[in-house]
Image (cartoon, rainbow, N blue to C red):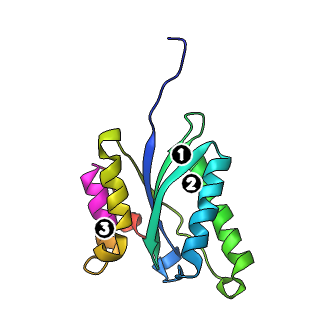
Amino acid sequence: MGQTLVYYRYHTVFSTKHRRPLLTQEIMPQLIKVIGGITRDRDGALLAMNGTEDHVHLLTFFHQKRAVADVVRDIKSISSDWVHTHFPAQADFAWQNGYGSFTVSKSLCEDAERYIANQQKRHATETFEQEFLSLLERHGVEYDLKYVLD
């Protein structure tokens, strides 16, 4: 085959360190733009993003030449620096160490977008911890509860 043809979409989830409620209504719209720019700079696209005060969900496309771990590391590092620079009162802002990232087939992309869009409604009745463990189980990810939530 003369070409490399792929369809990679990722639903990635990570929280603020210790799930502190630091993602305010003032920060979040700007953070979406920043993370979109970081993703574009790495040959990808931010297709959807939403979250609550303590975590975010991203639906992204990354070019096949990019490792998911590298792009997520850059997103977290650069966006954290951006928060520190633009919101000096948030000097202790940090993302959790880890993240969850799940592939999304084309047939389920719209469902993933709706899921991400409905975060505020979901978290009226469900904690981040409950949601994250549910995502891990739904995607068949093995985990040790002792280490999965920092």
Query: Residue at the right extreme?
Result: 85
Read off the residue under disc 3: 131
Q: In which quarter of the image is residue 115?
A: bottom left
Amino acid marked by disc 1: Val
The residues tagged by marks 3 and 1 sit, at their Cα atoms, a distance apart of 22 Å
Residue name at image x 65 percent, y 55 percent? 38
Residue name at image x 45 percent, y 38 percent? 8
Of labels 2 and 3, earlier in sequence is: 2
Query: In the rendered view, would you say 97 is above or below 100?
Result: below
Magenta part, dominant SS: helix
Amino acid marked by disc 2: Val
Part of the protein shown in magenta: 131-140
Q: Percent x, y for residue 20?
A: 49, 82
Q: Percent x, y for residue 43?
A: 63, 42
Secondary structure type for disc 1: helix
Q: Viewer-proximal residue, 146 or 36? A: 36
Q: Percent x, y for residue 13?
A: 44, 61
Read off the residue under disc 2: 72
Secondary structure type for disc 3: helix
